[in-house]
Image (cartoon, helix red, strand yellow):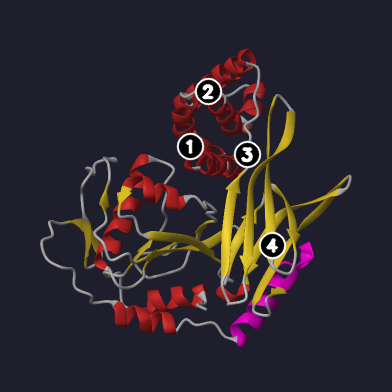
Amino acid sequence: MINKRLLIKNLLAHNDENSFYDKKRKVDISYKEGKAKFLKHICALSNSNPKNNSYIVIGVKDEDNKIIGTDFFDDSKIQNLINAYLDNPPIVQYENIPFPHLPDDKVVGLVTIRPIDQITSLRKNIWKYYGGSVFFRDGSMSMPKVFDIEIKDVNSKIVSAIENHAQNNIELTLNGVFDFLNKRKDFEPQYKVFKEYFVLCWSGDKKQVKEEVFFSRVDIELINEQVRLFYSALDEVSITFDNHSFTIVEYVRLGLQNSFKYYQLEETTISFDNHANYTINANLIFEPPQFNRKVLHHIYNTNNTILEKLEKGLVLGNHEIIDLENLAASYLICYLNGFEDALPKLEFAKPYIKKYSDTLYKSYKETIRILRKVRYS
């Protein structure tokens, strides 16, 4: 089993970006240009590595390989995006890898692209790239190319050696468990061994509502691979497990005009078998809350007025400041209730919310995360 933290270190130590791995400071697929560039890199790495895995490491400075981290990205539906836009899509996995020196809310993103030994191309137009385009790696660049010869296998031995040097061992596993228990000691950290092989650690701020137990500030890590499976500073989750599986049900708090409820968003089950394998299945179980359309029209227009003032740099009134705190979430509710124009408004609001305050921007990112899960499902 590969220790992903060690794998990232080995990739970064292997000279610079090349035809089997790429590194990025950040990736943002919440807008069209970001999606297009991400798909281009996936396509290029897949085509340039028909016999071996290829990788993208996210949260690294290009100049000096310094690990600065990126936001936790828990979109289990990323394969849906790949399948929608690429012909002969590769199998793509996005994992969040914690590093001890990073803040709690930061990880390194690791994208693994598994070979299919077929030419991958864009299925349809996106941003400035045309449907039918084929990309390859040219050194550290992803470039469109015309191909008429068989792709040579030049990276298999190198990648195999890098992966072999990243194999997990007992020392790394024990260190990972103790690191987690020490870091999360304020939130009653726990661990469980599944099938005498896998070690799962989790922690959270426990809250009991009647007969149900919920956790916030939840952190869940698969120690064998040094992968963070779940992290949320805002939402509430329920956790259940037996000797074969570990299940997380994620809830989101949504509402209007100071009337909020918790809604089930997604159920994720990690299943362990007897052959040192595990699978993760995520099912969206979200039922969008429905509201009175007259109320929604009023809130939608109020949001538009606030956004216009932010754009012009005008001072907000006291009530508008309160409404601003819920602007992203209320735009989301409007969109889920059939207000299609609420989505571009939400995207347009991003730089103004980011500039306004860090707390507000964190709430905005949480809203975008919910939206991304709902749309790609």
**Sequence order check: which comes first, mark 3 or mark 4?**
4
As measured in the structure, the alpha-carbon distance from the residue carrying label 4 to the one carrying label 2 is 35 Å
**CB atoms of marks 3 and 4 within 8 Å:** no
As measured in the structure, the alpha-carbon distance from the residue carrying label 3 to the one carrying label 2 is 16 Å
Vertical side of 172 occupied by 137: above or below: above
Residue placed most toward the observer, 93 or 140 = 93
As measured in the structure, the alpha-carbon distance from the residue carrying label 1 to the one carrying label 3 is 24 Å
**Sequence order check: which comes first, mark 1 or mark 4?**
4
Instruction: Tell me the kind of residue under disc 1.
Output: Lys
Overall secondary structure of the magenta section: helix
Q: Given the current orientation, which residue lies at the most extreme front position?
A: 274
Residue at label 1? 350
As measured in the structure, the alpha-carbon distance from the residue carrying label 2 to the one carrying label 1 is 21 Å
Where in the figure is residue 274, as x and y percent of width and height? 62, 76
Q: Given the current orientation, which residue lies at the most extreme top position?
A: 294
Instruction: Tell me the kind of residue under disc 2.
Output: Gly
Where in the figure is residue 372, as x and y percent of width and height? 50, 42
Task: Say whether residue 184 is magenta.
Answer: yes
Relative to 185, is 130 on the left or the right? Answer: left
Of circles 1 and 3, the one toward us is 3
Write the start and end of the magenta stretch as one range: 170-192
Does dot 1 land on a helix, a strand or a loop? Answer: helix
**Sequence order check: which comes first, mark 4 or mark 2?**
4
Residue at label 4? 246
**Sequence order check: which comes first, mark 3 or mark 2?**
3
Residue at label 3? 286
**Sequence order check: which comes first, mark 2 or mark 1?**
2
